[in-house]
Image: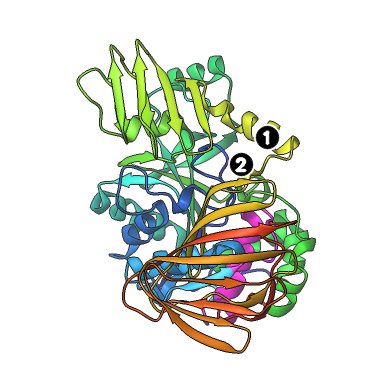
Amino acid sequence: MPYSNQSRRESAAIKLVILAGGGGTRLFPLSRTCLPKQFLRLGNSDSLVTQTIKRFLPLVKPSDIIVVTNKEYIHHVKTELAICGASSAHILLEPVARNTAPAIALAAKFCQDELGASAHEVLFVTPADHIIHPIDTFIKNVRQAIELAAQDKVVTFGVKPDKPETGYGYIQAGETFEVGYQVVSFREKPDKDTAESYLAAGNYYWNSGMFAFTIGRIMEEFREHAPEIYQLVSASLPEVIDKFDAMPRISIDYAVAEKSAQVVMVPLTTYWNDIGSWDAIYDVLEKDHAGNALKGDCLPIDCTNTLMLGRNRLIAGIGLEDVLVVETDDVIVVAKRGESQKVKDVVAELKARGRREVDEHTTMYRPWGSYTVLGEGPGYKLKKIIVTPGQQLSLQLHYHRSEHWIVIGGTAKVMIGEQEQMVHVNESVYIPPSTKHRLENPGKLPLEIIEVQNGTYLEEDDIVRFDDVYGRV
């Protein structure tokens, strides 16, 4: 039965949907599949997803927040929710990645079936990786969008461009509609000449990727414009999840916004940056007197308008102008300013070559802590493992390697076979191949150990788990 808007003004209740499942390739080498950009801390003590959550807390309760992500990032999301005092927020796992339209349809279904939301409740949908300030002005804009959404509109935010940006999609604004404009069209990322014509025209806005609509309105839009999605999402929630891989790979822009007659745009009157490139990072970071943005151990000599972002090593630049330098312990990316959108081409080439750098950092985060590969060669691998207080690794064994653990900080509780023992600083234990073992931190300080692996096969998939508190068995 088509959605009726008869009682659309009766409720101002909203649910916030945060899309946090993207892999993020344009900020390589910091953003990788294992730790995409929404979990990075760039020029701020908070990650981008934590900044997003905090931005909306003046408007919604944590229990009205739904974070849509995938199983690989669930522990990152839980950590960020705890950091910002929003642990009661809901985490909704996409079975597979299917772009924003299926993700939004799944979130709307979850709100209906699990949270009891009515068809007239407003969903505000936002990516997890934007920088927006000041917050009080942004909240005013959000309230404007919610009021329009309650009038049965599909509302999006447009950002007034201040340069001919080729990395963003554009919205063409038409006649005024209350505090916003009716949308004439959505335009794909343009070339430089087209972007300059948009800037000169004056009625084109950057597409922010944020939307507001009632649950009933978006379901009706799916019914009319994306019937394949509507049919799948009309089943019960368990059935939707079970058949989610049949969803089309399509964005909400293509599926709904470009086709709907109900779309209006509210101009965003705050600073906005979607952190979609290293050029965008340069724009948001503080500059020195020569226009250089410096993070880490950097030494610029006669450099101007240059980004140097270091993590582990000294970066010394001489005579650089309009250059981007990003360093990690295993990758260095150097680019001209204005060319950083092509980082995605680097990632595509590395992926075609099967390079692990696309997916992995040398430091990998796990629900129990992290490990860093310090060195490796034929038949050996050297790691530093950090286990946070109260956490434990799974009960496991390895068929192809032995392990030698040396405690360098904290206290370890170790099970090898049927024997359990405490291991303190400067003490060590040996785990033979094919032997069940578990590592636990029973103390109040981080447990730090050096792990030496020896064997014929040293990859992470040589793990057989028997028991795991994080559900990975």
Which residues fall within the magenta stretch? 93-117
- Quarter of the rendering containing residue 240: bottom right
Amino acid type, residue under disc 1 in the picture: Leu
Q: Crowding at label 1, few (<14), some or many (≥20) Cα neighbours within 10 Å? A: some
* Relative side of 117 to 137, left or right: right
Which disc number belongs to residue 238? none
Mark 2 in CB contact with mark 1 (< 8 angstroms): yes
Q: Is residue 137 above or below residue 302?
A: below
Q: Is residue 75 above or below residue 357?
A: below
- Mark 2–mark 1 distance (CA, rounded to whole Å): 8 Å
Which disc number belongs to residue 350? 1
Q: Is residue 419 above or below residue 291?
A: below
* Relative side of 31 to 267, left or right: right
Q: Position of residue 445 (x, y in %)?
A: 32, 72
Q: Position of residue 404 (x, y in %)?
A: 56, 65
**Residue closest to the eye, 321 or 162:** 321
Residue that extends furthest to the left in the rendered view of this protein: 289
Helix, strand or loop under label 2: helix
- Please indicate, yes or no, whether residue 61 appears anywhere in the rendered image: yes
Q: Quadrant of the N terminus?
A: bottom right
Residue 248 highlighted magenta (yes or no): no
Q: Is residue 236 above or below residue 41?
A: below
Q: Position of residue 397 (x, y in %)?
A: 68, 74
Amino acid type, residue under disc 2 in the picture: Glu
**Residue closest to the eye, 36 or 54:** 36
Q: Earlier in the sequence, mark 2 or mark 1?
A: 1
**Residue closest to the eye, 388 or 134:** 388
Task: Tell me the residue that label 2 is attached to.
Answer: 357
